[in-house]
Amino acid sequence: MKKIIFAALAACFLPCLAFAQLKITGTVSDNSTLLPLPDVTIRIKETNKLNVSDKNGIFEFNNLKPGIYTLTLSHIGYKLNTHVVEIEANKSIQIKLIPTSFIAEEVLVQSTRVGKQGVSTFKNISKSEIENQNFGQDLPFLIQNTPGVVVTSDAGAGVGYTGIRIRGSDPTRVNVTINGIPYNDSESQGTFWVNMPDFASSIDNIQIQRGLGTSTNGAGSFGGSVNILTSSVSDLPFVSTNNSIGSFGTLKNTIKLGTGLIGNFSFEGRLSRIKSDGFIDRSKSDLQSYFVSGAFKTDKEVLRVNVFGGKEQTYQAWNGIPEAKLRGNLNDINDYINRNGLSGNDALNIINANPRTYNSFLYEDQNDNYWQKHYQALYAVQLNDNYNLNLAAHYTDGKGYFEEFKENQKLSNYGISPVLIGNTTIERSDLVRRRWLDNDFYGITYSLSFKNDKLSWTIGGAYNEYLGDHFGEVIKSNFGNVINLDNHYYDNRGTKKDFNVYGKLNFNVSEKFNLFGDLQYRNINYRVVGTDKNRNQLFVKDDLNFFNPKFGLNYILNSNQHLYTSLSFAKKEPNRDDYINFSNGFTPLPEGMADLEIGYRANTKNLDFGINGYGMWYKDQLIITGKINEVGEYFRQNVPKSYRIGLEADVAYTINSKFKILANAAISQNKINTYIDYSDDYDNGGQVEEIYKNTNISFSPSTIIGSELVYIPLKNLALSFQSKYVGKQYLDNTEHESRSLNSHFVNHLRMGYSFSILGIKNIQLGLLINNLFDKKYESNGYTFGYYYGGKRVTENFYFPQAGRHFITNLNINF
């Protein structure tokens, strides 16, 4: 009887066995580097099934019948590969792709980047790393877990106005390029990420160089550079949508689509919006952006046209919170109210507000508004096996204003005549003013590169022009008839012409030794004509010529390890405020720096490690001292000698398929040899000078440590625990404990789960819990002081960051 039952069951299951559902899993890697290749398109000829390798080069096909299959693998910059597989059971394969002579769109930025065995200190951040971090916060918060980086947010939660410092250097000393084209504002030299909300969704990769780095275009890199490459061509058509929602009313909606390659053409587009109420009171942001790109590509050339832009409206939160409110009691707050002449609603606001979310602005339209549009045409061609040519043209159109309420203002300060009411002459009024910037930035960049087994060189450069109209208007007052919107109460134009040319040389002396040289000449022509915000006449004229040489040596220990050293010299021009606020009859000096870098890098299958030491010695560094000019404006002064010396380390170690550890550390000493601090003397007039020797440079923590533990318990589930420690920072250069930011240690938890269902290519769920342990800390601040009543009064202001808060997202890819 048992034999009969067994035979019946076997007969039932034989059809199922005959049509067994099998799968092929595989890994794709580069034939020369053996590194995994993401985004490789794999097609099964017999079934027409498609798949794309993930960030680890892994792909998978399910529900296959036993038989012989032909796989075709294609990837930009690699030769087409055909692989025949016979399966009778589940099978795992490994495939290596051979690079073609023309390497994808990286060629568009190679002239301003450091190669794998370069002599500069750098960190590369891949597209997948950016995507994992992108929950809608500004770009600085996505790259904060890199050595020597500190980020801050005015609104406290990473949306709106944010900033980044590298090695203690502020954003005006961090060079930012997008596809090799300068992004820093030409006059202020700052970078305003709020003007490009969700730009991370259109980025392929980022290279962060620390120190002077290699010659690039735009503002001088005096602390670091952020080199961005936008999205490259996708082989396959796609549609994706990303939606985030979180604390403080944070909302992000993004939709992207692309045609994939249609012959030699491809198109891609993105629309995004981000909204947030902010952690700080009335610090809401309403941000919108777009990105459109079209490309023509052959084996020998790439032509890409990018059009992108953003619109932002952000309620001002840039005044910070007075120390009396943040840390004091009611008596301290009342003293602050009396010292600063607060009354009415302003006084009630500072008394009643939450100490960590107080915002001094109450006017309902105290907003910053800005629109920015970018146009880029990028062309790269491989002339032959040794030569590549890059050309780019660009234009940026920017326009915006910030609006503010001002109480009891002198009408004459705004070019408005006194108002006669009956027999009374009114010379003061409450009013609302707007301060405008309307600017244009355009130019060209170019490079010609040569490479063979022994030698490689690049000749490149750029010419850029900037036109910036600055003007102010009064839009409201207590007396409507005095307003004339066509009458600018101040009006000036800044023009800047920036020309540079550079030559870079790599020479392989032997199989072990490589020499590097980089010579740059830069010419700057800057003019400002008109009236400033105080209605004083402006005439700025400065012509500067800089020669910036860099030299380096690379020693290859083996295929996975190398040592490098470099010595670089560079100069950098002052910014707009330095020229305008400097004492009459004087011109600020350009800053100079010598940068020495010594490092070691190792890269194996499971380990990526780098350690480097550096010394950055400044001549005539421009810093805030508290000194004022003839009309009471504070300005930066040149300090003859200062320096930064430090040690940095960065490691990524894959323990096994489930655990990975990433860690970085930066330990430094940042000093000014001789510093003179100036404080206003309200008792006797003038200013009081105090001399300090060998004092710490402001906003330069001596210790910064970051870490991340990644745990993958299941194939499609990943958990990440991130930690960041930032040591004490001083608000000025006096090294007074009473004018400092406390150290802080903050932890974040990120979770991601991906799956496929109902024919959808991929669905990703994410959760980010920021400041997991609800740490109360401040990431930024400022200070000023004065003498009154025979003693020094110090006013400190801080920017608290949000406690525990979350953002969750849903990403769907078709």
Image (cartoon, rainbow, N blue to C red):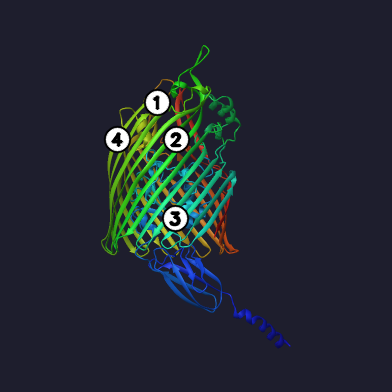
Q: Amino acid at mark 2?
A: His
Amino acid bearing label 3: Ser
Q: CA distance from mark 1 to mark 3?
A: 46 Å
Q: Nearer the viewer, mark 4 or mark 3?
A: 3
User: Which residue type does callout 1 highlight?
Assistant: Arg
Residue wearing tag 4: 542
User: 291 and 674: which one is in front?
Assistant: 291
Q: Position of residue 682 (x, y in %)?
A: 44, 22
Depicted 307 relative to depicted 484: above or below: below
Q: Of 423 and 751, which appears nearest the observer?
A: 423
Q: Which residue is mark 1?
A: 535
The type of residue carrying mark 4 is Asp
Residue 6, horizontal then vertical, whole percent: 69, 85
Give the position of the N terminus as an image quadrant.
bottom right
Which residue, given by chain and number where applicable, does mark 3 sit on? 231
Dot label at residue 506: none
Mark 3 burial class by Cα count in 10 Å: few <14, some 14-19, many 20+? some
Which of the two labelled residues, at mark 3 and mark 2, occupies the earlier sequence position?
3
Q: Earlier in the sequence, mark 1 or mark 4?
A: 1
